[in-house]
Image (cartoon, rainbow, N blue to C red):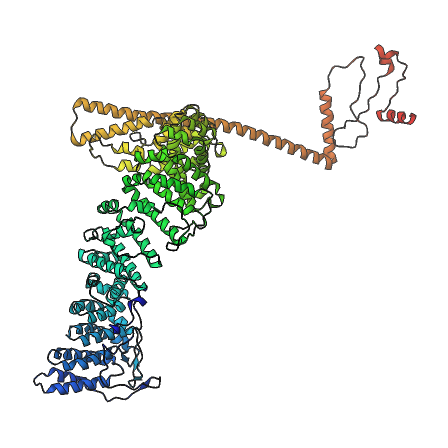
């Protein structure tokens, strides 16, 4: 066995075969004359050519046994002639010689030696004269290499081993010391490509049946297949010969060196990686293959003590994991499932099991990898209903719950802190899959208590530095977030069952308050508020609270104050984050679901939510018109309207541009009808009075009679859009005196107001159509149906008439407002024109003296015309003319007043001693200043 190159230990971790196995003279003795080594430089050698046609004719002649010696001599001469490589042009004749010689082995074993020498030459690089020879001879070469695999039929161990050695030589090509004159060796990968083209791998797989009971030959064939399986093309050829099942059945053969299992597993791995994994797994799922895999695994598990044995054991376990995913695999029938389940709980549950007698478990890296693989396969078994009984009977639940606790300081013979954390997270992740299936075991092991205590440790102040190295530890480095994340996943999985026993057990232990503490802990962690792990934790916590508080007022009262505050903080989320891809969308939906389940129905919680302006925040979210949010928000608002205080809050709300809630709801109705394809005219009025609210898809549906218990399409359509919720909400707000609506809104509102009438009409229309499909109504029934149809149609006409009236009134109002606006505009324009003309007249008077005189005359004429025609008899006359005026504008505020003559004064002024004198106001002031 030493000739089979490296021991398995040096390659158990690899997925590719060895490239340079050592040769051993024990299995391949040197045949023919020895060659002297050259001085390290490729040299050309001159050898007398051999007539290959003559050789073929000589071998074909079987008339006399005296020719055997001559035939052997000729074959040795051929070997000598081509000892440095076979020319491409002679390759077909060489293969004919090999085939003829192979037929003579049965009669004379002396032909074995030259056959081996010729086959050995096939392992050397082929010789070409031109660069194009590789392409020109590709078909011939591929067929010849394929015939090389057919020579495995020769009943000679030496020939078969040499064939395998030559095939292996394709992958470690060495140039000969000498070359034929005028020839060059082919490229290094040429033979590999030709082997793929000729389908050599398929032939070699089929030859395994010839060496089934011969270990040495079998190992050489497997080694050659190991090299060939590094190519995807070869793997596909091998699968045609059912290589996976054939090789798997050889795993349990007697082999002291361990090469058989090693090489077989390598080939299986290459097949899985390079071909259809489903096809390979289907081949390996038979009872015989699974049993062979199990026996090989158990042998390595119990008797393997080397590092390479442990690696090989883990490789087989991975293959078993892939097979376990196939529901048709015979894992349970052969006891493999039972063995793996018991092995997975071996260290956690101290119960001796005869299946594992003699097993010694260490804490090496390979055993750590096996432990993870066993946890993984438990998760796969949990998806198989037939394996649930085995999971329940073999203490899988206690074994997984063993890790739901903080890690203590590791001992000398224990997992390291990083390894324990990885196993802990993996076990809790698997527990989330197993717990819902084994609820009785879950409760009997007090799993709720363990998880709540573990969650309390997660949010506590105890120092812990998570490694975060594994897949399950992602995002938890330096914190307990990973442990919190998977613990909440377990609680979510069991709470999703809505099992009263589980939920009551949780609530009795104060789960609601503790879950609120988890939300506070993550919300106060502002540095990680947008982390995907934190968002998942918050969403799962809200889901658990929703499931616990739904339909239970007492639990809602426990949730109220702290819970409402947290919900409002989540509802106030920036809508731009909803499309971040981190999980904000899921968190917001969980918060809205929690609001519906934990607040609505409890008046104390509802009133506190209203006090915190929660309705305003919901309407702010609704105003963004996110299609996926509108449905649930409208449902929440409709439920909240049972509280009389809610309507006031909705009516008070104002959105962007002073938008009211009623206007927002009507806009959502129009958008929904547009999406449904409801027919409306350009003004939003009803276009089809027979089907006023039917969408395009609804109209295309054919009438199909359904049982009385099945809802028709008109009824099903109600739950598929938001129009029913909009109608319900507007009914609670009232259809009259809604502020902030335009004429277009009133047109739409008229349709919404009659939504129920229109829906009833649709149902009656379906009833009529179904009756006409299967029955012929009587005269009276037909008359009644006709009247019902006319009533529904009249409602549509009435609404259309009202809509037209609204539009006409609005049109008249617009015309009136337009006239008023036009009048104001015309007055402004007239004032501007007058100001402009006044300014132009002023400029004319300033620059044109004649115009000034004309203006003066007009002014005097105007003044004269304004004077009274009746003359004052005794009064004084004051002239309004200002002498020496040099301006073109009116006089200023400073005027000179001439006193009334003394002889004309009567009354008290006549007694004064003041002489009549004309005094300027400015002169009098000046004299007064001089005196002082």
The image position of residue 813, as x and y in percent, is 47, 26
For residue 106, side relative to residue 133 (left or right) = left
Residue sitting farthest toward the right: 931
Rendered residue at 85%/24% (across/down): 920
Quarter where residue 909 is shown: top right
The image position of residue 449, as x and y in percent, is 36, 39
For residue 57, side relative to residue 628 (left or right) = left
Quarter where residue 744 is shown: top left
Q: Nearer the viewer, residue 326 or 701?
A: 326
Rendered residue at 65%/32% (across/down): 835
Q: Quadrant of the N terminus?
A: bottom left
Q: Is residue 335 visible?
A: yes
Residue sitting farthest toward the top: 907
The image position of residue 602, as x and y in percent, is 39, 27
Q: Nearer the viewer, residue 906 or 237?
A: 237
Q: Quadrant of the C terminus?
A: top right
Q: Is residue 683 visible?
A: no
Disc tally is 0
The image position of residue 401, as x and y in percent, is 33, 45
């Amino acid at each position: 066995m030493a000739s089979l190159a490296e021991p398995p230990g040096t390659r158990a971790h690899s997925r590719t075969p060895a490239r340079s196995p050592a040769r051993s003279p024990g299995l391949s003795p040197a045949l023919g004359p020895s060659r002297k080594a050259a001085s390290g430089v490729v040299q050309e050698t001159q050898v007398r050519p051999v007539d290959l046609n003559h050789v073929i004719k000589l071998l074909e002649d079987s008339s006399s046994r005296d020719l055997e010696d001559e035939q052997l001599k000729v074959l040795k001469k051929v070997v000598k002639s081509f000892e440095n490589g076979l020319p491409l042009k002679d390759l077909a004749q060489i293969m004919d010689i090999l085939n003829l010689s192979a037929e003579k082995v049965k009669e004379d074993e002396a032909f074995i030696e030259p056959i081996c020498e010729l086959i050995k030459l096939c392992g050397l690089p082929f010789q070409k004269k031109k660069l194009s020879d590789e392409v020109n001879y590709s078909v011939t070469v591929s067929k010849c290499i394929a015939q090389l695999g057919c020579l495995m039929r020769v009943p000679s161990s030496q020939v078969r081993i040499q064939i395998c050695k030559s095939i292996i030589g394709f992958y470690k090509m060495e140039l000969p010391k000498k070359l034929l004159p005028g020839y060059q060796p082919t490229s290094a990968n040429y033979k590999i490509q030709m082997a793929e083209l000729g389908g050599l791998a398929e032939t070699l797989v089929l030859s395994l049946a010839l060496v089934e009971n011969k270990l040495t030959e079998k190992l050489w064939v497997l080694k050659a297949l190991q090299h060939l399986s590094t190519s995807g093309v070869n793997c596909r050829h091998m699968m045609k010969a059912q290589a996976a099942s054939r090789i798997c059945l050889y795993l349990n053969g007697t082999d002291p060196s361990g090469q058989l299992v090693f090489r077989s597993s390598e080939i299986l791995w290459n097949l899985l990686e390079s071909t259809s994994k489903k096809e390979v797994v289907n081949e390996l799922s038979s009872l015989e293959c699974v049993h062979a895999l199990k026996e090989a695994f158990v042998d390595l598990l119990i008797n393997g003590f080397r590092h390479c044995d442990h690696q090989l054991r883990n490789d087989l376990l991975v293959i078993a994991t892939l097979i376990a995913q196939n529901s048709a695999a015979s894992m349970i029938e052969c006891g493999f499932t039972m063995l793996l389940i018991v092995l997975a709980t071996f260290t956690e549950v101290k119960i001796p099991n005869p299946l594992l007698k003699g097993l010694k478990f260490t804490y090496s890296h390979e055993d750590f990898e096996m432990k993870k693989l066993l946890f993984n396969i438990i998760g796969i078994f949990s998806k198989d209903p037939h394996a649930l009984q085995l999971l329940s009977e073999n203490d899988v639940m206690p074994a997984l719950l063993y890790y739901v606790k903080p890690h203590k300081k590791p001992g000398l013979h224990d997992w390291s802190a990083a390894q324990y954390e990885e196993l802990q997270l993996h076990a809790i992740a698997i527990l989330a899959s197993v717990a819902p299936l084994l609820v009785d075991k879950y409760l009997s092991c007090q799993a709720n208590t363990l998880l709540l205590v573990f969650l309390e440790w997660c949010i506590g102040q105890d120092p812990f530095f998570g490694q975060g190295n594994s897949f399950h530890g992602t995002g938890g480095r330096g914190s307990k977030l990973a442990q919190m994340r998977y613990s909440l996943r377990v609680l979510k999985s069991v709470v999703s069952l809505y099992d009263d026993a589980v939920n009551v057990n949780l609530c009795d232990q104060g789960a609601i308050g503790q879950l609120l503490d988890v939300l506070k802990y993550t919300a106060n962690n502002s540095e990680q508020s947008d982390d995907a792990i934190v968002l998942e934790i918050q969403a799962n916590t809200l889901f658990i609270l929703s499931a616990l508080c739904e339909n239970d007022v007492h639990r809602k009262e426990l949730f109220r104050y702290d819970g409402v505050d947290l919900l409002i903080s989540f509802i106030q989320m920036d809508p731009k984050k909803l499309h971040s891809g981190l999980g904000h969308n899921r968190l917001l939906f969980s918060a809205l679901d929690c609001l519906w389940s934990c607040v609505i129905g409890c008046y104390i919680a509802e009133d506190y939510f209203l006090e915190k302006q929660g309705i305003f925040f919901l309407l702010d979210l609704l105003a963004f018109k996110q299609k996926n949010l509108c449905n649930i928000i409208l449902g929440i608002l409709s439920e909240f309207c049972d509280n009389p205080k809610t309507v006031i809050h909705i009516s008070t709300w104002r959105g962007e541009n002073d938008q009211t809630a009623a206007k927002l709801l009507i806009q959502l109705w129009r958008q929904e009808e547009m999406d449904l394809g409801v027919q409306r005219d350009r003004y939003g009025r009803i276009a089809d009075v027979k089907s006023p609210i039917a969408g395009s898809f609804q109209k295309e549906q054919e009438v199909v009679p359904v049982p009385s218990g099945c809802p028709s399409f008109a009824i099903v359509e109600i739950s598929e859009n938001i129009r029913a919720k909009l109608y319900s909400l507007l009914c609670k707000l009232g259809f009259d005196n809604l502020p902030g609506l335009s004429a277009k809104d009133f047109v739409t509102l008229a349709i919404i107001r009659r939504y129920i009438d229109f829906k009833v009409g649709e149902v009656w229309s379906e009833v009529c159509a179904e009756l006409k499909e299967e029955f012929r109504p009587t005269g009276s029934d037909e008359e009644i149906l006709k009247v019902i149809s006319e009533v529904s149609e009249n409602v549509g006409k009435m609404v259309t008439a009202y809509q037209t009236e609204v539009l006409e009134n609005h049109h008249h109002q617009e015309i009136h407002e337009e006239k008023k606006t036009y009048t104001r505009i015309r007055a402004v324009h007239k004032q501007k024109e007058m100001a402009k003309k006044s300014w132009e007249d002023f400029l004319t008077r300033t620059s044109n003296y004649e115009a000034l005189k004309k203006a003066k005359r007009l002014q005097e004429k105007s003044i004269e015309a304004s004077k009274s025609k009746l003359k004052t008899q005794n009064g004084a006359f004051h002239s309004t003319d200002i002498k020496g005026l040099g301006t073109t504008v009116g006089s200023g505020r400073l005027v000179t007043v001439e006193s009334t003559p003394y002889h004309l004064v009567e009354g008290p002024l006549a007694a004064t001693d003041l002489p009549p004198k004309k005094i300027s106001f400015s002169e009098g002031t000046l004299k007064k200043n001089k005196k002082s």
